[in-house]
Amino acid sequence: EVAAGALKNLAEGDKKTKMVVMQAVESLVGLATSGTDECKRYACQALGNLACYDEGNQMAIELAGAVEPLVSLLRSGTAANKQAAAEALEDLALDNHNNQWAIAQAGAVDPLVALLKNGTDSGKEAAAGLL
């Protein structure tokens, strides 16, 4: 959990720091799949931070297989993890039609609608932005 939290914090840094954290994308995808609930949340936040406004990172994160685990968290994660997954998916989809398509194909629409109806305020905001 500590390592995932550290990667989340580093992913908020400058471009050079983000380049270093990008080396851990596959590990972050793994944590989003099989870590503790807190690890999953941190992994989602780190992936979102890395993807935000960076088309190259968005593509690399999608190619690393992040979409399926994030959509899975939308379906069955804790409230905090659903919110974090929606926010990460929103960052992956930002101005990226290929990722928007991949997210829709992974079955994100129904869990996003459910989050829009029943999620936290931030989760609802992310779901609305993605839909």
Image (tube, rainbow, N blue to C red):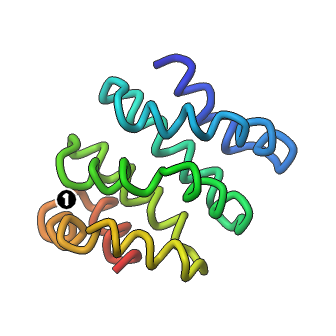
**Front in this rendered view, residue 46 or 101:** 101
Residue 63 drawn above or below residue 109: above
Name the residue located 21 percent from the left edge and 70 percent from the top edge: 116
Check disc 1 and give the amino acid type: Gly
Residue 22: x and y, percent?
A: 71, 42
Which quadrant would residue 56 be assigned to in this image? bottom right
Name the residue located 55 percent from the left edge and 58 percent from the top edge: 62
**Front in this rendered view, residue 73 or 15:** 73
Name the residue located 14 percent from the left edge and 67 percent from the top edge: 114
Residue 3: x and y, percent?
A: 57, 20
The residue singled out by tag 1 in the image is: 119
Circle 1 residues within 10 Å: few <14, some 14–19, many ≥20: some
Residue 78 drawn above or below residue 92: above
Name the residue located 44 percent from the left edge and 71 percent from the top edge: 102
Tell me: 98 left or right of 114. Answer: right
**Front in this rendered view, residue 121 or 36:** 36
Residue 91: x and y, percent?
A: 54, 64
Q: Residue furthest top?
A: 2
Q: How many numbered circles does the render carry?
A: 1
Tell me: 121 left or right of 62. Answer: left
